[in-house]
């Protein structure tokens, strides 16, 4: 199947692998994966816990289906979906000693100014989430205005701004959404934000 990808799909596949690597999520490319390939586009996946190796242990699976909604008479809508086994997910959470909590709004929302800083944004997401900090980032939003509106809609306490200039200096800007105060922080000292 991999021999028949067009250039756009090859680039997308390469980026998916790069983002998984940045997040240190191990993955196996399985050209024999059997999901509904007639409507999936670009990516199909299954999620299997580290300690399992059989298909029966999959927590869930899914993929992109950008053309499906349009095929059914709707407008062109990018989409990704998945289904999971509820009991398997709960058992896995229990084994991992993870518990679901509720938090009304994120502590941080990441705003990116330029595609060059997106890998850094993904690293930040991973860092904060692995430290149980609620953080949001919407990769499809491009303008600063739309990202700030979204941060406001989420009621984020702080906005982390990653711009090309700050990125080149290994820094980020942190804006307090309540006071409007903004300051720069070195990316090497992220522990200060925990």
Image (cartoon, rainbow, N blue to C red):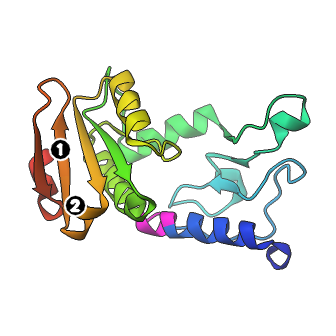
Is residue 49 found left or right of 37 in the rendered image?
Answer: left
Quarter of the figure that contains the N terminus? bottom right
Is residue 29 found left or right of 98 in the rendered image?
Answer: right
Q: Which residue is drawn at 49% across and 43% down?
A: 92
Q: Which of marks 1 and 2 is nearer the N terminus?
A: 2
Circle 1 residues within 10 Å: few <14, some 14–19, many ≥20: many
Front position in the image: 118 or 56:
118
Is residue 171 found left or right of 154 in the rendered image?
Answer: left
Q: In this view, does 45 lie above or below 74?
A: below
Q: Residue at x 22, y 29 (%)?
A: 157
Whole-percent x, y for residue 136 in the image: 38, 38
Q: Does the magenta stretch include residue 21?
A: yes
Circle 2 residues within 10 Å: few <14, some 14–19, many ≥20: some
Tell me, yes or no, whether the two marked residues, 1 and 2, touch with CB atoms within 8 Å.
no
Front position in the image: 86 or 157:
157
Q: Which residue is drawn at 18% across and 68% down?
A: 169
* Location of residue 10 (image quadrant): bottom right
The secondary structure type at the circle numbered 2 is helix
Whole-percent x, y for residue 180 in the image: 14, 30
> Is residue 119 in view from this perspective?
yes
> Is residue 100 in view from this perspective?
no
- Read off the residue under disc 2: 166
* Location of residue 152 (image quadrant): top left
- Read off the residue under disc 1: 174
Whole-percent x, y for residue 30 in the image: 72, 69
Quarter of the figure that contains the C terminus? top left
Indicate which label's residue lies in the foreground, 1 or 2: 2
Q: Is residue 62 above or below residue 179?
A: below
Q: Which residue is drawn at 57% across and 67% down?
A: 15
Residues rendered magenta in the picture? 19-25
């Amino acid at each position: 199947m991999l021999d028949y990808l067009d250039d756009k799909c090859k680039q997308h596949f390469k980026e998916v692998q790069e983002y998984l690597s940045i997040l240190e999520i191990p993955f196996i490319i399985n050209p024999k994966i059997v999901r509904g390939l007639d409507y999936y586009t670009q990516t199909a996946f299954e999620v299997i816990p580290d300690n399992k190796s059989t298909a029966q242990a999959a927590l869930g699976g899914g993929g992109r289906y950008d053309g499906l909604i349009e095929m059914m008479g709707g407008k062109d809508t990018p989409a990704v979906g998945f289904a999971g086994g509820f009991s398997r997910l709960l058992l896995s959470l229990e084994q991992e000693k993870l518990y679901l909590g509720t938090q009304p709004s994120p502590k941080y929302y990441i705003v990116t100014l330029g595609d060059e800083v997106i890998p850094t944004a993904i690293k930040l997401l991973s860092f904060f989430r692995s430290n149980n900090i609620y953080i949001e980032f919407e990769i499809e939003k491009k303008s600063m205005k739309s990202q700030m509106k979204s941060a406001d809609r989420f009621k984020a306490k702080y906005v982390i701004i990653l711009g090309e200039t700050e990125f080149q200096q290994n820094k980020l800007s942190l804006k307090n959404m309540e006071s409007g105060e903004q300051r720069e922080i070195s990316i090497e000292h992220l522990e200060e934000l925990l």
